[in-house]
Amino acid sequence: MDSKTLKILNEHIIAAVDFFSANDQKIKDLLDLIEFRLKHGGKFIVFGNGGSASDSAHFVAELLGRFEKERKSVGAVDLTSSNSTITSISNDYGYENVFSRQVEGLATKHDILLGITTSGQSKNVLKAMQTSKDTLNIILTSTKIEPIENQVELYTNFIFKVPSHNTARIQEVHIMFLHALAGLIEERFL
C-alpha cells in the first residue's frame, strides 16, 4: 500500500473510532427516542446538500427497503430527490427554504428530522430544523465549524459531529453512522 493510501486509511480509522467512541451513549439514547416515535406512527424526514443529499437518499432507501434483514418497511422521506419540488420552492421562496417548506408540509409531532451538513453551515438544513419544534431533530455534521451548537442547540435534540476537518473523511463517517443507525433500528425493534 502506498503512503498516500495508507495516510487516507489512517485518517478514516481515527475519525471513525473517535466519532463512535465519543457518541456511544448518545446513540443509545437516540435509539430510545426513535423507537418511541416509530411505534407511534412517526417517520424519518432526511435531507442534505450535495454528497449529503446522496447520503440522505441512501439512508431512506435502507429504511424503506431493507438494510441487512427482511423486516417491515420503516417510514422515511428523502427531501432531496424531487427535482420539481426543489426547483419550485427554490424559485418561489429561495434555496434557503427548500427543506423548511417541505418540513412544514410533511412533518408531524412523532417524526424524526435528520439533517446532514458536512460544514455545519448549510442554511437550508439549519432553517428546516428551526421549522419544527415538535419533531425529534438530529444534525449530522463535523467539527469543521465549532460554533454550530450556538446556531442550532435551541431546536436540535442531537448534534453528532465527526472530529475531522477533511470533507471526505467526514462524509465517510456520516455514511458509517447512517449504516450503523439502520442496522441498530433493524436489530432493536423491527
Image (tube, rainbow, N blue to C red):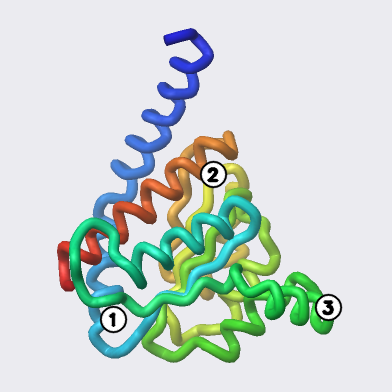
Per the image, the residue denoted by label 1 is 38
Q: Secondary structure at mark 2?
A: loop
Q: Residue at x 24, y 81 (%)?
A: 36
Horizontal side, residue 142 vs residue 82: left or right? left
Q: Are marks 3 and 2 in contact (CB under 8 Å)?
A: no
Check the picture and name the quadrant holding the N terminus.
top left
> In the image, which is nearer the foreground, mark 3 or mark 1?
3
Of labels 3 and 2, earlier in sequence is 3
> Can you give x and y, in whole percent of width and height, for residue 95 in the image?
77, 71
Instruction: Classify mark 1: residues with Cα within 10 Å, few (<14), some (14-19) or many (20+).
Output: some
- State which quadrant residue 69 falls in: bottom left
Horizontal side, residue 123 vs residue 23: left or right? right
Residue situated in front as seen by the camera: 30 or 102: 102
Residue type highlighted by circle 2: Thr
Residue type highlighted by circle 1: Leu
- The alpha-carbon separation of the residues under discs 3 and 1 comes to 34 Å
> Can you give x and y, in whole percent of width and height, for residue 83 in the image?
69, 72
Label annotation for residue 91: 3
Residue 88 position (above or below residue 17):
below
Q: Residue at x 29, y 42 (%)?
A: 21
Residue 16 position (above or below residue 121):
above
Of labels 1 and 2, earlier in sequence is 1
Label annotation for residue 143: 2
Q: Residue at x 67, y 60 (%)?
A: 122
